Amino acid sequence: NKFKEGLAKTRSAFIDRMDDLFRRRKKIDEEFYEELEEIMIGADVGVNTVMELIDGLRAEVKKRRIEDPQELQPILSERLIELLRGDEKVGLRYADSGLTVILFVGVNGVGKTTTIGKLAHQMKSEGKKVLLAAGDTFRAGAIEQLEMWGQRVGVDVIKQSAGSDPAAVMYDAIQAAKSRGVDVLLCDTAGRLQNKVNLMEELHKIYRVIRREIPDAPHEALLVLDATMGQNALQQAKLFGDKTGLTGLVLTKLDGTAKGGIVVAIRQELDLPVKFVGLGEKMDDLQPFDSEQFVNALFT
Ligand code: GDP
């Protein structure tokens, strides 16, 4: 089970502590709630969400006259699944026919290129014809890095020289994709934050060019967030906001954090489905997100 493996750090910090709490405490009292609260906030579940969860548990305890803390555990996991619901097997939106265009946005270093590489690999093994567009013409080495993934996976990359107009790269890539009968075009974009206004304008221009060529596209615009950044990832998401027409999230590096509760916080604070999670650096370490599988991997 990939989820279970990838979530090992979160399991041992967050879930084992909860297990211990549920077993150790004999009574459901204020101290119990306080400790539970502390553990969940420590795992980056997010203060508001934690308060809601605790309120929900209190109500349940009252209603069902629950006395044994251990009886609360399945209720809590059910609630967590509930909070993440809507994300079960959402999958990606593909074009009804012809070319599907998927745009990846996010700050440098969050794992955009890696995610594109992994997804290209996945799609290719499903028999799809995939092409990559090197839309980060700004960061030194970004094009080469995408090309490296292209070689590794065995898919072509459409690029121009460093510093060129990313919208022009997208135009080229769409033409190439159409003439080669490509199924899915995965587009990398720049992630510099030092000039946010320019970056947003650049992204808008990319949108316009894509839409002019294919009115229905981009079929997905996925914001890539680094789970190890915890609450800062949320701040980043707000920076990009809905100005970039986002349709979903990819949460990377979940294997690298003990604070996997961030998935719940992100799901609560942003009105966007989590489409994939990154659980490692290798080609196979990208999983379509499924809330039930996710929570089950944590608790069982
Ligand atoms: P970009 O600047 O957004 O394109 O980020 P990169 O794709 O270059 O990734 C930055 C670093 O994060 C690289 O060292 C990747 O190997 C690593 N990385 C990306 N995704 C994951 C993941 O899911 N788990 C782990 N452990 N590392 C990841």
Image (spheres, grey):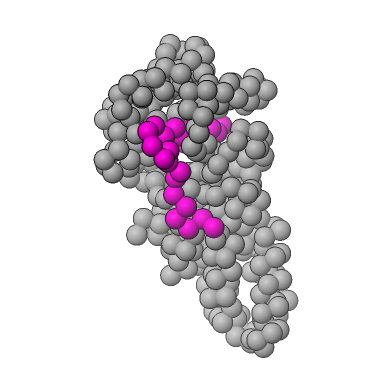
Q: Residue at x 44, y 49 (%)?
A: 91
Q: Residue at x 54, y 65 (%)?
A: 81
Left or right of 128, for residue 168: right
x%, y% of residue 173? 40, 21
Per the image, is 90 magenta? yes
- Can see residue 69? yes
Residue 37, picture quadrant = bottom right
Quarter in which the C terminus is drawn: bottom left
Quarter in which the N terminus is drawn: bottom left
Q: Residue at x 46, y 21 (%)?
A: 170
Which stretch appears magenta? Answer: 86-111
Q: Nearer the viewer, residue 215 or 101?
A: 215
Left or right of 155, for residue 37: right
Would you say the magenta stretch is mainly helix, strand or loop? loop
x%, y% of residue 26? 61, 84
Query: Considering only vertical position in the picture, is 165 above or below 182?
Result: above
Query: Considering only vertical position in the picture, is 131 above or below 165?
Result: below
